[in-house]
Amino acid sequence: MLPARKEFVENAAFAALQAACKRTIYAALAHRGQHRLSFENWKEARDLGVALPEADPCLPRWHAAIAESDNVNVEYEEVAAGADTILVVDLEPDIAQGLERALREHPLRPHLVENHPAYAGYGWYDALHQLGNVRFYVAAGEQGHVIAENGSFPPLDDHVRAETIELRFCVFHRASETQREERIPADVAFVVGEDGWYSGVDQIRIAYVPGPALTPEMLVDLIENVCFCASDDSEADSWDTQHEHFLRDARELAARVLLGEDEAIAARIRDTLAGILWVIPKDRQVAITVAPGTAINVQLSACQPAG
């Protein structure tokens, strides 16, 4: 096409050429005998006179979404779809992380796979079950909360220590238009404000049931997955610096929620001192005393021999 000669003239001959190319590609896939084409591509092949089998019934195992989706660190694994396979609808990280934690030892967990809308229309895909309508019912004294994808009702104005948290979700069988509700105990649920992903931990709210399984370290990992998303603004610090500051705040928050205010203060002090440990000689130990209204007292002494 003039004047640049960088585009084809889109006429009948060009359309015929495109159809011939596509027919050749689809014929090669038919010869191979298996493919991962979308349903729309499969229909196109059929319209061009190439009979293809349906796409391979394989889907990636489900993993909960994290706020920083470009930094996902999970092992990609495909599983064969069958009668017990359950598609998981797209969930925001605050709901997905709570769901994944509650299901970590549940019999349904191995059967959960990522949904793949491009396969909609294939018989095997349309026959799969689907998990959705995820809610957390939080019982805290006389006050109850329902946490779902559109927030918490009533709102969580602060972190909530709960007597119980019950995860509820529905498993739909789309072919028969039937569903069942599952109810499973949970120990944590999250709500994140709309601006929370770029604002540190200030906008996250946590409902939790104290117990040995929910440690501060575990809660820090969950908080990071739920709401850490580094800003790519030109004036922002590096990813590493943003991440370091976020983890410091997350450790303080986890300690305050699970262990109390004193431990949160201690956690912040430990994090601060960890950045200057290099100034302490290897053969010395340091005792630091800080009293209100007085100077900081630092005493160095020789390391005591072990034992």
Image (cartoon, rainbow, N blue to C red):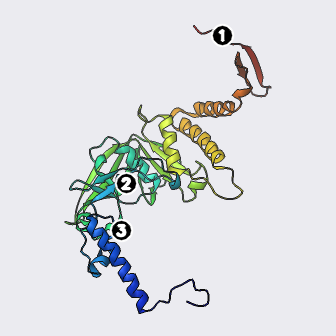
Q: Is residue 263 left or right of residue 25?
A: right
**Residue 265 pos. (x, y %):** 63, 33
- The image quarter containing residue 285 is top right
- Quadrant where the N terminus sits is bottom right
Residue linked to disc 1: 304
Residue linked to disc 2: 135
Tell me the mark number nearer the camera, choosing from 2 and 3.
3
SS assignment at label 2:
strand
For disc 2, the neighbor class at 10 Å (few under 14, some 14 to 19, many from 20) is many
Residue 143 visible in the current orientation = no
Q: Is residue 18 left or right of residue 273?
A: left
The residue closer to the viewer here, 74 or 128, is 74
The residue closer to the viewer here, 258 or 299, is 299
**Disc 1 to disc 3, C-alpha distance:** 66 Å
Instruction: Kindly identify the amino acid type of the residue bearing the numbered disc 3.
Output: Ala
Instruction: Kindly identify the amino acid type of the residue bearing the numbered disc 1.
Output: Gln
Instruction: Kindly identify the amino acid type of the residue bearing the numbered disc 2.
Output: Arg
**Residue 301 pos. (x, y %):** 73, 13
**Residue 187 pos. (x, y %):** 40, 41
**Disc 2 to disc 1, C-alpha distance:** 54 Å
SS assignment at label 1:
loop
**Disc 2 to disc 3, C-alpha distance:** 27 Å
Residue linked to disc 3: 118
For disc 1, the neighbor class at 10 Å (few under 14, some 14 to 19, many from 20) is few
Q: Residue at x 24, y 68 (%)?
A: 53
- The image quarter containing residue 283 is top right
Mark 2 in CB contact with mark 3 (< 8 angstroms): no
The residue closer to the viewer here, 305 or 152, is 305
SS assignment at label 3:
helix
- The image quarter containing residue 82 is bottom left
